[in-house]
Every structure is written in C-alpha cells, then in structure tokens.
Image (cartoon, helix red, strand yellow):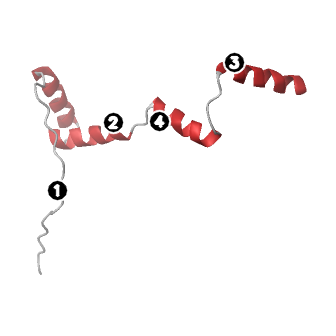
Amino acid sequence: MTTTIRKHNVSMKNVLVRDLPDDIHAALQRKAEQRHQSLQQYLTVELRRLAERRQLDDVLADLEQRHGGRVGLTDAVAGLASERERR
C-alpha cells in the first residue's frame, strides 16, 4: 500500500478584518460552532454566498440587455393603454 501526499500549490487570497468588535466575533464564532465548522470555514461559506448573491442593479442590467433598453414609466403606461385599446 502506497500513500500519496499532495501539496497544495494554489495560493489562496487572505482577508484581514481589523477592529472587529468582540461581540461580533463571538457571534460569528458561535454560528461556526453550531455548524461544526471552524470560523475560517464558516466565513468562507458566508463570503461566497454574499459574493454570489445578485443585487437588484445586476438583475436590472441583465433585463436591460435582454430587452434592448429601459422604458420610462410614462412610456410603459402609454404602451399598455394603447395595447388595451387595440383589444
């Protein structure tokens, strides 16, 4: 039986948070412990979730690209009224 030892050569980025209040640190530590994770593991998961969460501006920008631009409220109301009259 042979054992293979792999070294990680990938350099991961680090984040340092200065002046974190004790109560915030304690709350984060409790949450990590409840999930049976280290604080680093817990924060990595939460930061990933935060980074991947789409903001309203992102959604609106996607809609703008798909539908060819923005329509003002007045134009939208007029367009709806015109469409309703045709029916």
**Label 4 amino acid?**
Asp
**Label 1 amino acid?**
Ser
Image-based side of 46 in relation to 68, left or right: left
In three-dimensional space, the C-alpha distance between marks 1 and 3, rounded to whole angstroms, equals 53 Å
Q: Say which quarter of the image contains residue 3.
A: bottom left
Q: Earlier in the sequence, mark 1 or mark 3?
A: 1
Q: Earlier in the sequence, mark 4 or mark 1?
A: 1
Image-based side of 59 in relation to 9, left or right: right
Residue assigned mark 2? 50
Q: Earlier in the sequence, mark 1 or mark 2?
A: 1
Residue assigned mark 3? 74
| 8 vs 74, nearest the viewer | 74
Viewer-nearest of labels 1 and 3? 3
In three-dimensional space, the C-alpha distance between marks 3 and 2, rounded to whole angstroms, equals 35 Å
Q: Earlier in the sequence, mark 3 or mark 2?
A: 2
Rendered position, 33 above or below 21: below
In three-dimensional space, the C-alpha distance between marks 2 and 4, rounded to whole angstroms, equals 14 Å
Residue assigned mark 4? 58
Residue assigned mark 1? 11
In three-dimensional space, the C-alpha distance between marks 1 and 2, rounded to whole angstroms, equals 22 Å
| 56 vs 64, nearest the viewer | 64
Q: Residues within 10 Å of mark 1 (few under 14, many from 20)?
A: few
The residue lying at 69 percent from left, 18 percent from top is: 74
